[in-house]
Image: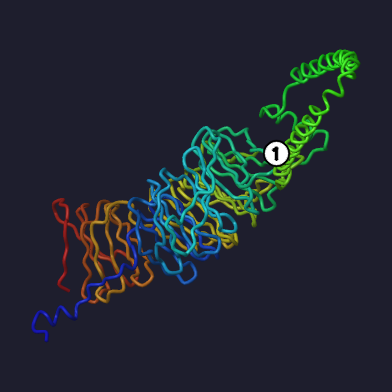
Amino acid sequence: MLFGNDRKLSRMKFSYKFSNLCGTVYKCGNVCYSADGTVLYSPVGNRISVFDLVNHTSYTLPFETRKNVSRICVSNNGRYMIAVDVDGKALFVNLKRRVVLYRFSFEGSVQDICFSPDDSLIAVAIGRKFQLWYTPTEQRHFAPLERFKETGQHFDTITCIHWSPDGKYLVTGSEDMNVRLFSVDRYRDFYTVTLTGHRSSVLGAYFSSDGKEVYSVCADGGVLEWKWSEVDNETWERMQRFIDRKLGYVKGDEEEEEKEKGDDDEKDDDDNNDDDNEEEDDDNNDDEKDDDEKDDDDDNNDDNEDDSDHNNTNNNNDNNDTTNTLPSSIYTHGHWSISARHSLEEHGMTVTSCDFNATAHLLVLGLSSGLFALYELPGFTRIHSLSISRNDVSSCVINRSGDWLAFGCASLGQLLVWEWQSETYVLKQQGHYYSINALEFSPDGAMVATGGDDGKVKLWSVSSGFCFVTFADHTAAVNDLCYVRGGHALLSASSDGTVRAYDLIRYRNFRTLTTPTPVQFTCVTCDA
């Protein structure tokens, strides 16, 4: 039996479940869409917020990393997510169940990460190299994440990595102002391709939908179009000889001439030896009877040598067959060249983020001035541009259908989703970009009011997690908040020496209270 306080404790709930994170919507890293393009994932510190753009709801995933999340990516089938913090500690998450399957470390700061088109491999850019990992399965393993290969050849940090449509090649961009093309598997006639000609660090490199073109974006606003073109057999053979000579697979012309000269000398020596052998044959005819047994032994030895030579020949043929049985690359009998070079119309601005949709042929650029520009490739035709803030655009992404553009501004804590065809906002959220000093629930519990050092008062919906009203009347930090009885008005006390009353029906500041002498208000309460 329970008595007194024990009975009260039995009715209390201690298993509280975290639901949503309010106060800010974006802090750092990249934002990304779900596989169907209707859900947006945004890093907020060491957590990840999820925004349902169709049902207008949001929630926060119930896990966290040790430090701030720097990179996130979602698989193409929409089942898994990888979240990596600034130290390279990663979480492999099942999005359907909202649970962490595996925790592992890449042992380095990750600049970019993405799944292959069939979700079988994961490409990770770490420093000057990139790694390929097999995608973990839902079955429990001692070492679920197995590395497939590691390569690089860049001279500076890799900034971006992108898969070809067939998942057989990757293109990487680096701060060394180069773009490199790699193959996942070995091919008989493929070599790593280096695309040069950029004037600043490369922020993005992307394949076209057919894989015959590569688009690279530089920090200075330059956009280069690279096109694959085939050549005739004679030109291709000359290119192959040049490449092989550079790689040391064949000898130069001088060495080949010396080899031919040496072969002629050996031929003359063989002719002289043949004449001497004819004279010796006459002397050996008299001794044939004495050497019968010896000849039999020599025949047996010759048979053994022939068998060994046959085995060696078979081994050599096997090695040649291994080389010859390698598949052929699609990039054969041709080369990459610059087909077009473009630049921004806005001078003095730098590109801070970019993304490309190969299906819709759309390229979006986020600039340091808070402006974004949407282009159609090839041709670099400007479709739309809009100024969304005064600070640089930290992250931008296009959904799979190419209808919605998502932008994140870290300095303002701002998150936007823009439908460029109708020129309307799908989502426009901005949290407090300074510390939150005050928080107050409404009497009915449906709203949460927050005030911060930025001088703003924001109203958040408890059910959806969205900020639906922002009051920016204060000129200094907001220190305290108070609802009046009934919840139809809100009071705020600020360091600017004012107490403001807000009408929560018309959403306006209808009264401002001050004192004869300047003071800083730290708290406020109301009895009505």
Look at the picture and state if 316 lies above or below 68: above
Residue 375 versus residue 325: which sits nearer the camera? 325
Residue 435 versus residue 233: which sits nearer the camera? 233
Q: Position of residue 327 (x, y in %)?
A: 71, 48
Q: What residue type is labelled 1?
A: Trp
Q: Can residue 52 be seen in this view?
A: yes
**Mark 1 neighbour density, 10 Å: few (under 14) some (14–19) many (20 or more):** some
Q: Position of residue 431 (x, y in %)?
A: 35, 57
- Residue at the far bottom: name it: 1
Look at the picture and state if 164 lies above or below 287: below
Q: How many marks?
A: 1
Is residue 430 left or right of 342 when viewed as pictured? left
Q: Where is residue 522 in the image (x, y as percent from the top left)?
A: 16, 56
The chosen color scheme is rainbow
Is residue 67 left or right of 416 when viewed as pictured? left
Look at the picture and state if 431 lies above or below 229: below
Is residue 293 left or right of 528 when viewed as pictured? right
Secondary structure under badge 1?
A: strand
Residue where numbered disc 1 is placed? 336
Q: Residue at horizontal 75%, vertical 32%?
A: 301
Q: Quadrant of the N terminus?
A: bottom left
Q: Residue at horizontal 29%, vertical 64%?
A: 509
Q: Where is residue 26 in the image (x, y as percent from the top left)?
A: 39, 55
Q: Is residue 228 visible?
A: no
Quarter-wise, where is residue 236 in the image? top right
Residue 526 versus residue 317: which sits nearer the camera? 317
- Residue at the far left: name it: 4
Q: Quadrant of the C terminus?
A: bottom left
